[in-house]
Amino acid sequence: MEMLKAGIKSTFKKTEKTMDERLNAIRAGVLGSNDGILTVVGVLFSVAGATTNQFAIFIAGLADLLGCALSMASGEYASVSSQTDSEKVVVKAEEALLKTDFPAQHQVVTNFYMERGVSKTTASHIADELLHDKPLATVLSIKYDITLGHYVNPWDAAWASLFSAALGGAFPLLALMLAPVKYQFLATIAATAVAVALTGFLSAKLSDGLVGKAVVRNVAIGMLTIAIHYGVGLFF
C-alpha cells in the first residue's frame, strides 16, 4: 500500500512542462503549416489563372503568406487564452469546494480509486493522504486531468503557428519563384504535395492516427485546393 501511495503522489509532482503543454505548441505548429501551405498555393494559382505577370503573382503570394501567418498566430492566441482562462476558473471553483464541501471532494477521490479496483478502505486512506498533502492538485488531476500550475501557454501556440504557417507557405511560393518559368507550376504542385504529405504524416503520428490515410487525404485536399483556385482565377 505504501508503494501504491508513493506512486500516486509522484504523479502530482511539478515538472518543467506537461505533455499537454508540449503538444499544445506542436499541434499549433502542424495546423499552422498546413494552413500556410494551402492558403498560399490557393492564392498563387488564383492569381496565376487570371494573369501571367510574375511580379503580381509573387506579391499576392507573399502578402497572403504574411497575412496567413499573422492570422493563424492571433487565432491560436485567442483560442488557447480562452482555454487557459477556463482552466483557471475551474481551479478557483475547486478551491472553493474544498473549503465548503470537503466530504464530497473526498468521496470523489475515493470513488476514483475504487473504480480502478482498489478496496474502499484503501481508497479512503489514499484519499485522506492525498487531500492532506495536495488537496487542490489532487482534485484537479482526478476530476479534470489538469496539473495545478501548468496551463497551456497561448504565446507558445501563437509563435509556433506564426513560424510554421510562414514556413509552410514558403514551400509553394519559393517553388513558383525559383523554378524555370516553363516548369514553375509543376514545381509548385510538387512542392505543395510534399509539404502537405509531411503535415499529414506529422498530424497522424501525433494523434496516433492512420498515417497513410492522413497523407493521402492531405495531398488530395492540396490538389483540390489548387484546382478550385486556378478555376476561380480563369474567370477573371
Image (spheres, rainbow, N blue to C red):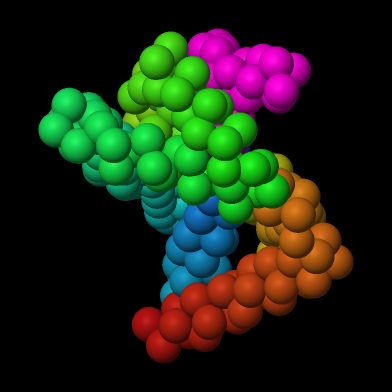
Closest to the observer: 135 or 120?
120
Vertical placement of residue 109 versus 236, above or below? above
Vertical placement of residue 44 versus 232, above or below? above
> Farthest right residue?
212
- Residue depicted at x 66% and y 42%: 118
Image quarter in which the N terminus is found: top right
Q: Report which quarter residue 104 is drawn in.
A: top left
Taking the magenta stretch, the answer to whether it contains residue 14 is yes
- Residue depicted at x 80% and y 71%: 213
- How many marks overall? 0
Vertical placement of residue 170 versus 125, above or below? below
Q: Residue 146 in the image: state x and y as whole percent.
A: 43, 34
Lateral position of residue 110 relative to residue 80, left or right:
right
Closest to the observer: 224 or 23?
23
- Residue depicted at x 29% and y 37%: 103
Q: Residue 107 in the image: state x and y as whole percent.
A: 39, 42
Lateral position of residue 228 relative to residue 156, left or right:
right
Closest to the observer: 171 or 20?
20
Main SS, magenta residues: helix
Is residue 207 in view?
Answer: yes
Closest to the observer: 1 or 72?
1
> Farthest front residue?
121
Q: Residue 124 in the image: state x and y as whole percent.
A: 50, 34
Image quarter in which the C terminus is found: bottom left
Q: Report which quarter residue 3 is drawn in.
A: top right
Q: Give the range drawn in magenta.
A: 1-25
Q: Residue 220 in the image: state x and y as whole percent.
A: 71, 76
Taking the magenta stretch, the answer to whether it contains residue 31 is no
